[in-house]
Image (cartoon, helix red, strand yellow):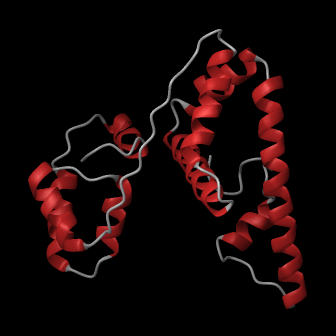
Amino acid sequence: MIGDDRPRGILSPADRAYLRGETAFESDQSERNARARIRDRVLAGLYDADLLADALSERDRELVFGKHVGGDPEAVRALIGTLSLLYRGAEEAGLDFGSLLEEGVSRAEADRNVAAAVEFEVRREPLDPDSLTRKLRRTGSLTLSELSYLREADDVSLDRLLDRYATDVETDEADDDWVQAKMTSF
């Protein structure tokens, strides 16, 4: 449900259009006001998420995530985008995302009367076309972000290599978007 067909969430349709670069403001002040309004809504959305974690009924949560998110590649991508925003936001706030993730999972599992242990590790490696090309040839797989990075590289031989792997995938048509949304290997 991408685009402006969906109901208002944190962002209004006008906010979405602005962030996608589809609209411009008549004055710098109008643009600053819009950006401030968006920041305020993001913060309010975080507070709303805290309330939803505690107050949204189990049935409603199951209907949103089980019925709507689980079978919709666009919704899965939105969930991934949400995690990406939270990861970057935690970093910018000087907070350890792993600790936040552990607390969040523990809070969710405590509602089920279960104790949870979480292990979270991030290994960072600079992206460069040569190493990713070697990885693709060696393993036959890349994450969606690695694939996207390679697609942006101006190298015709990379495009041919990526097209070869992209067309070698054997999945049901219905599963194709799901595979990419889950960021699994090609």
Picture mark count: 0
Q: Quadrant of residue 125?
A: bottom left
Q: Is residue 82 above or below residue 116?
A: below
Q: Is residue 103 above or below residue 87?
A: above
Q: Quadrant of residue 13?
A: bottom right
Q: Please name whichever residue, 158 or 139, is drawn nearer the observer in this view of the structure.
A: 139
Q: Please name whichever residue, 60 or 112, is drawn nearer the observer in this view of the structure.
A: 112
Q: Is residue 41 left or right of residue 1?
A: right
Q: Quadrant of residue 31?
A: bottom right
Q: Is residue 117 left or right of residue 20?
A: left
Q: Is residue 144 left or right of residue 21?
A: left
Q: Give the residue at the far top of this rendering.
A: 113
Q: Is residue 65 above or below residue 82?
A: above
Q: Residue 18, position in %: x, y?
A: 73, 73
Residue at position x 64%, y 54% in the image: 90
Residue at position x 32%, y 60% in the image: 146
Q: Residue 122, position in %: x, y?
A: 41, 50
Q: Please name whichever residue, 92 or 181, is drawn nearer the observer in this view of the structure.
A: 92
Q: Please name whichever residue, 132 or 116, is drawn nearer the observer in this view of the structure.
A: 116
Q: Residue 142, position in %: x, y?
A: 26, 53
Residue at position x 49%, y 41% in the image: 73
Q: Is residue 24 above or below residue 120?
A: below
Residue at position x 61%, y 48% in the image: 82
